[in-house]
Image (cartoon, rainbow, N blue to C red):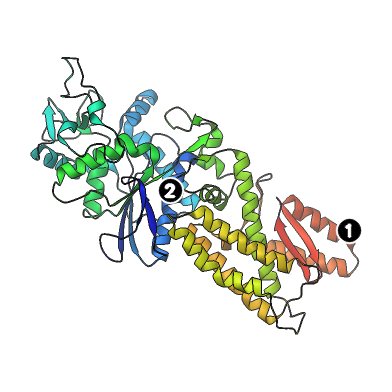
Amino acid sequence: MSLTVYNTIHRQKEIFKPLEDGKVGMYVCGPTVYNYISIGNSRPIVVFNMVRNYLRFSGYEVKYIQNITDIEDKIIKKAKEEKVDYRVITDRYTRAFLEDVKNLEVGQFSSMPVATEMIPEIIDIIKKIIENGYGYVVGGNVYFEVGKFSGYGKLSGQNINEMKETGDEGFEKRNKIDFALWKEAKEGEPSWESPWGRGRPGWHIECSAMSTALLAGKIDIHGGGIDLVFPHHENEIAQSEGAFPGEGDFVKYWMHNGMIEVKEEKMSKSSGLKENWILRNLLKIYSPDTIKLYILSTHYRSPLEFSMGKLDEAGRALEKITNTLKNIRFLTGQKDTSDDLRISSNLEAAVGSFEQNFKDSMDDDFNSAKAIGDIFELIKNINNIIQKPDFEINSSFKKVLQKAHERIIELGMVLGLNFEKEVSGISKNPETRTEITKEEIEKLIAERETARKSSDYKKADEIRIYLQSKGIILEDRKEGTIWNLKG
């Protein structure tokens, strides 16, 4: 099966074939840094990290660019409200964004350009747009003349003939639908020198300048939220193809993730964020993998409902995976209890076909929801065998279980889910916020086992109760004691 991608501009799935064999250029719109990012802002970060990971897993060399917008009307407004220089705002929220990305545990970007550091590139592309007849200057402002670009609306389906021209003679734009490429400086606002006087870039132009400069015009995938289709991405197409006419489509595949919704309420930084919408607050309660599993368990193009209950469900789902992996580790470390080397043919077949099933799911427009379903199907098959009261372990079972363990860990990482860390690393209890390491847990379990063997049941109970207070539940089995996270 070949990888297919839903291309927004053609409104259909298409077989993925990059512009250059073996290499993929990706550009994804990043945040405007005037507030903390929400769980909604984190969806494209998680989604396109998954896309990048799967492309690499499939053998492609991927260059992945995400920008930071550090000059824009909302930033200037915030600075005025706080009576500080705009850079105080951008420095604060850029640092916060980078911390959040690190704590969310997604891979590094190949480059993360900042708008104010690419003013020369922005000015250069505006010059090209003007030279090619698509831009015009009014005073110190530069506008893109939408009516001259015949392809306007091809991404969003907007019909420019239905957009009314302004009837205000004092209105300086030639047409209401024209948009700013460069804005004349206003008193007290940040500005830079340009051929049109001091000013600053419009919002849309930075992405055209960054993507074409840093990816040398070879943009296979351009991504972002569905809310950016119009006007932002539509304007990017007009700007970029207006600056470089005759060079073909600006982008080959347009990918857009659906929005995260709160019962018909828009999750927006500009309209104010509730405390439990802010990503950094959620990361104090839930592990990065819980948040990522919540996001990836729904296909990226579909809307996603947000609630703390949904995150709790994702946490329980993650525990099912990690508990099974712990059980596999426990069983493969035990002595054989049977000389019979037969194993379940159903289990062997399920493990054997798991990776192909996973690939088939991901090849269908990066269907992470189905791929996660493939993981749970394998886990169900494993648990149906190992949780039987009469189950006995042998060397053949160990090999199959070990293979399952390796594949689940490996393919989880392709999605961006670090099951290895969840199984072996630090466990955090959401209720107490205390931490306890795997080594400490296993040491206490060994002490408890020693106490039980010497009939010191009081001490054994004290250890069990202590671990329970840390969110650790013990299960005594005939093979020994295993531990799980409290649900």
Q: Secondary structure at mark 1?
A: helix
Density class for disc 1 (Cα within 10 Å; few <14, some 14-19, many ≥20) is: few
Q: Quadrant of residue 466?
A: bottom right
Residue at 37 percent of width and 28 percent of height = 78
Percent across and percent down for residue 197 are: 13, 30
Q: Quadrant of residue 481?
A: bottom right
Figure check: 239 above or below 326 = above
Is residue 144 visible in the rendered image? The answer is no
Q: Amino acid at mark 2?
A: Ile
Of circles 1 and 2, the one toward us is 2
Figure check: 128 above or below 421 = above
Residue at 32 percent of width and 46 percent of height = 67
Of the image marks 1 and 2, the number of the one nearer the N terminus: 2
Verify CB contact (< 8 Å) between mark 1 and mark 2. Answer: no
Number of numbered discs visible in the structure rendering: 2
Residue 444 or residue 9, whichever sits in front:
9
Residue at 46 percent of width and 51 percent of height = 102
Percent across and percent down for residue 304 are: 51, 41
Q: Which residue is tagged 1?
A: 458
Density class for disc 2 (Cα within 10 Å; few <14, some 14-19, many ≥20) is: many
- Most extreme residue toward the bottom is 339
Q: Is residue 340 left or right of residue 240?
A: right
User: Residue 45's mark?
Assistant: 2
Q: Amino acid at mark 1?
A: Lys
